[in-house]
């Protein structure tokens, strides 16, 4: 594959990288390959870097204004790439998606309110519910041989049993890799509306969509949906600290804004504003190339684990692979620890994503094919040597 925009970068030790430099901090073996946190080993697009260099050349990092170009870049991108029509006035800029989740919980629900979470899922969804003094109500996604599905009967049942007020939804879904279909999204929205459940839809992974699939923003079905987004995953900009909450209702927008203002958070990070503007104005070709690269990497991992006890769950989007290791006969804590300490590959233990994540591992495949293959070979070899160890050896 000829690559014009994607450049891998794996020499990241001693760069203050959480992904890499935590290896030393945790005293893991120094050659550990980190495939855990959702941070890509891919350089920021050159057009964005040039824009940021120009910003630094202005030599002042003073208080900023969010420009019309910034909000217009977001609305144009949503329309162009996702057939999604939102008005620039619906955009609230926040530092990151997790703070947006917490702000929605605090501003729009009451202490002890029941909040529905479809697990396994990105763990801050339920950690935020707990941290803000609300009640987590889990509905488990169901793992069929063909992939994961929502259990609509269970969802309806839980909403009614616990008087659920809000749902935090992940689309596409981290970690099970689903790009939800139109009929699933419609049914989901219908159930929430019938039961007056407010929907927070985290769509941060919406650019990572594989061939044959299409991401449909939930707000396209119902303008009351509160959408969370950020260029930070697609363009590897997490520390630029800019994300968005899209809210049509001005009264809901005001409640969320008041919450940020109570914390004294009035200003966005100009570095992130400029990066987001350029990313959404100029870099569609980077997104297309990135999706090809990720899909190629997914296929490499699948090939590597063919005929092994590691089963790669069908993936339709994101760059976070969900590996079913239940057939290996090694308890997940032992497997997870052994992979780090002995095989020197750092993955996430699936159980941190919710009760049904036990028996799974999450692998971030957004790295160079060379490093990825090395990691998969190490995993395969270690598992072969330890398969069907007694589960009691945890
Ligand atoms: C679904 C999802 N939401 C939010 C985040 C984090 O976003 P932020 O860094 O903006 O808080 C992640 C990061 O992996 C994620 O996977």
Image (cartoon, grey):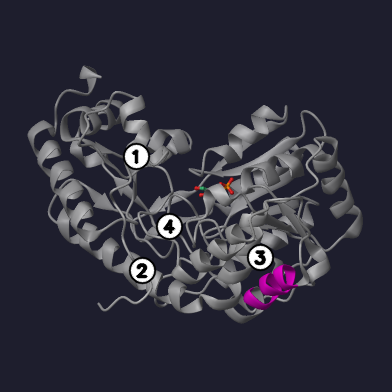
Q: Quadrant of the C terminus?
A: top left
Q: Nearer the viewer, mark 2 or mark 4?
A: 2
Q: Is residue 137 left or right of residue 199?
A: left
Q: What residue is disc 4 on?
A: 177
**Overall secondary structure of the magenta section:** helix
First in sequence, mark 3 or 4: give its number. Answer: 4
Q: Is residue 51 left or right of residue 323?
A: right
First in sequence, mark 4 or 1: give its number. Answer: 1
Give the spatial CA distance, label 3 vs label 1: 35 Å
The answer to whether residue 138 shows anywhere in this view is: no
Quarter assignment of residue 93: bottom right
Give the spatial CA distance, label 3 vs label 2: 29 Å
Residue, x 62% and y 56% (percent of image)? 272
Magenta part of the chain: 69-77
- Between residues 49 and 330, which one lies in front from this camera angle? 49
- The residue sitting at the top extreme is 393
First in sequence, mark 3 or 1: give its number. Answer: 1
Q: Nearer the viewer, mark 3 or mark 2?
A: 2
Q: What residue is disc 1 on?
A: 20
Residue 6 got which mark? 2
In the rendering, at what x and y percent does residue 341 appear?
21, 27
In the rendering, at what x and y percent does residue 161 appear?
71, 37
Rendered view: 245 above or below 330: below
Residue 218 got which mark? 3
- Give the crowd class for mark 2: few <14, some 14-19, many >=20 residues within 10 Å: some
Residue, x 34% and y 73% (percent of image)? 292
Q: Secondary structure at mark 4?
A: loop
């Amino acid at each position: 594959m000829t690559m014009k925009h994607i450049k891998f970068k794996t020499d990241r030790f001693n760069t203050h990288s959480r992904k890499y430099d935590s290896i030393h901090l945790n005293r893991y073996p120094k050659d550990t390959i980190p495939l855990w946190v959702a941070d890509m080993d891919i350089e920021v697009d050159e057009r964005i870097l040039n824009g940021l260099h120009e910003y630094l050349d202005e030599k002042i990092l003073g208080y900023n204004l969010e420009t019309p170009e910034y909000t217009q870049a977001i609305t144009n991108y949503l329309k162009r790439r996702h057939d999604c029509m939102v008005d620039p006035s619906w955009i609230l800029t926040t530092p990151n998606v997790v703070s947006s989740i917490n702000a929605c919980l605090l501003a729009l629900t009451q202490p002890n309110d029941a909040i529905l979470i479809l697990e396994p899922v990105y763990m801050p969804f339920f950690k935020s519910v707990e941290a803000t003094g609300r009640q987590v109500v889990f509905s488990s996604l169901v793992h069929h041989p063909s992939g994961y599905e929502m259990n609509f009967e269970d969802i309806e049942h839980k909403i009614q049993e616990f008087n659920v007020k809000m749902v935090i939804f992940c689309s596409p879904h981290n970690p099970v890799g689903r790009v939800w279909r139109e009929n699933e999204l419609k049914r989901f929205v219908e159930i929430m509306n019938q039961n007056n459940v407010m929907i927070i839809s985290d769509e941060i992974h919406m650019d990572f969509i594989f061939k044959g699939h299409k991401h449909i923003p939930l707000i396209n079905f119902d303008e009351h949906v509160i959408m969370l987004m950020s260029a930070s995953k697609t363009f590897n900009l997490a520390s630029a600290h800019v994300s968005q909450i899209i809210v049509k209702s001005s009264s809901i927008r005001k409640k969320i804004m008041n919450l940020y203002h109570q914390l004294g958070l009035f200003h966005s990070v100009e570095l992130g504003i400029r990066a987001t503007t350029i990313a959404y104005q100029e870099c569609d070709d980077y997104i297309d190339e990135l999706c090809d690269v990720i899909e190629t990497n997914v296929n490499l991992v699948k090939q590597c684990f063919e005929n092994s006890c590691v089963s790669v769950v069908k993936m339709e989007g994101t760059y976070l692979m969900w590996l079913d290791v239940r057939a290996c006969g090694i308890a997940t804590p032992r497997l997870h620890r052994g992979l780090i300490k002995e095989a020197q590959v750092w993955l996430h233990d699936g159980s941190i994503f919710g009760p049904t994540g036990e028996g799974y591992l999450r692998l971030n495949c957004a790295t160079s094919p060379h490093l990825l293959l090395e990691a998969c070979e190490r995993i395969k070899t270690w598992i072969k040597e330890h398969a069907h160890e007694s589960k009691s050896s945890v």
